Image (spheres, rainbow, N blue to C red):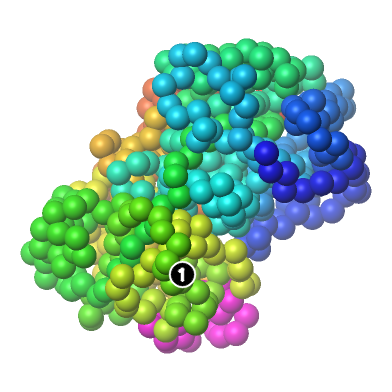
Amino acid sequence: MALLGITPQEIYTYPSGTWINRHQNVTQKYPQRFDVNNPLYGGGDQLPYLRQTVTALQSLIAGAVKDQVRLRAYGGTWSLSTAPVTNGRLVNTKPLNWLSLVKDVYKDPAYTGTFEYLVFMQCGVSVQEANDALARKNLALKTSGASNGQTMVGAVSTGTHGSAFGFGAMQEYVVGIHLITGANSSVWLERSSRPVLNGQFAQALGAELKRDDALFNAALVSFGSFGIVHGLLVETEPLYLLNAKRWREPYSDVNSPLRKAMTALDFSGLSMPQPGKTPYHFEVVANLHDMREGAYVTTMYKQEYTADYEPPGPPIFDGVSPGEDLLGKIGSLTDILKPELITHLVNALISKNLPTYDNQLGTPGQMFNTTTLYGKGMSMELGVEPKHSTDILDFVLQSQEVKTFAGVVGIRYVKNSEATLAFTRFAPVTCTMEFQAVHSDTSTALYNFIWAELERRNIPYTLHWGQMNNFTEQRVQSMYGSARGEWLKSRKALLDDQTRSVFNSPFLESAGLAD
């Protein structure tokens, strides 16, 4: 068992103020804010201590119901959308960072996985904390996004897609959810098709055991609107290394091998490090202002962990490791240059911070380790079928709006998700296209152009729930079809009318999901 933070269990109350996210592109005024801490750990079974924390969180829900005000929990403040906040009370759950293996006594006999790889993570555990704690146990996450500053719950709840070509998004390794659903209720949620823990675990948390595939899949990506997610049960795997290579690959030729790889996932024409073997990670980064030498292609292959390797670090990558996105560094330019001059510095920045390399080894926590942000940033991420990836990149490159867009596009591929409202919903593989940029009107102009052009060309798309978006009820219905209704039905099944009202928000209303 590992306890990452030890503080007295208290609710600290703060008066009205303004909430600002880490990327500084979202602000929200609030009438009251609370910090919640775990009780002082005295040894023995951790669950009675966690139950005290659950009671504290339930008291905040009770107060919101009584006062008829809205409530929303937030963690790492990493999201670039308004999903984590509301026009009501805010609850900071970042201090709630217990992380523990699960005792054998709680195993359900029907569970078919490796029980020793199951890890319970409380809602405040960040991806970095998870990586560090798991590595000490010779374990690792099966996938993660490009950065590690967000909480595990925040990343999962917004559908962060991760980096594993054949695995899927981060929510795919979640097998249990502890969800606080009211002033006097909470549920331990699992799939009925895959029982994991027995009723004793739920009972110890004061929760009702619910096994239901539809409820579980809906709650996975619910961006804080199904109540307060107190913790997740995650299936990990033995610690492994990633062997990475980055190179420039020509793109302009319509018959180029890179285009074939991007649209058909056919790597036969590329100089792959391990020909004939599907990579763990495949990524294309396009500098929209300079494609003369092509795009940057990165591959990573999994291999068995050994301690005799040289990890990546600032001396090799000048502060930017193979998995880092450039959003933070690009964002720092907003306070330095006028928009029309940023392009030149972006070219220099990308050239400096995206070096080519080969045979670079590191654990997943070392490869995907961005935690530092510099100034305001913006990002918008599409989910599309791979066959549309080059069409989209082409019309963006040919647009007038791209000329004043200070940013890049990162393109990845992940297996489609089981989560009801996952934006990685295109089967069998979803292509994600992330447009990272400075915080400016010119960035927004390109985003608006892309959305309008996708709809004009009838290209189906989804959007990352934790990034810039154009959600309306009609668009969400178009993106998800009957899945939207299934998600709303599940929300009603888990939350009564009063509690649903408490966890509504302007974000939900704009997306037509506040029913």
Residue 405 position (above or below residue 306): below
Q: Quadrant of residue 255?
A: bottom left
Q: Quadrant of residue 499?
A: top right
* x then y, percent, for residue 475: 43, 38
Q: Seen in the image, is 414 located left or right of residue 510? A: left
Q: Quadrant of residue 509?
A: top right
- Amino acid type at circle 1 is Pro
Front residue (pair 331, 478): 331
To which residue does mark 1 refer? 311
Q: Seen in the image, is 95 located left or right of residue 446? A: right
Residue 71 position (above or below residue 339): above
Residue 242 position (above or below residue 217): below
Which residue occupies 30% across, 73% down?
358
Image quarter where the N terminus lies is top right
Which residue occupies 13% across, 54% down?
276
Residue 338 on the magenta span: yes
Prevalent SS, magenta region:
helix
Image quarter where the C terminus lies is top right
Front residue (pair 455, 358): 358
Q: Seen in the image, is 514 located left or right of residue 317? A: right
* x then y, percent, for residue 182: 74, 21
* x then y, percent, for residue 35: 83, 45
Q: What segment carries the magenta color? A: 330-351
Which residue occupies 59% across, 64% down?
371
Residue 454 on the magenta span: no
Which residue occupies 50% across, 57% down?
365
Front residue (pair 410, 268): 268
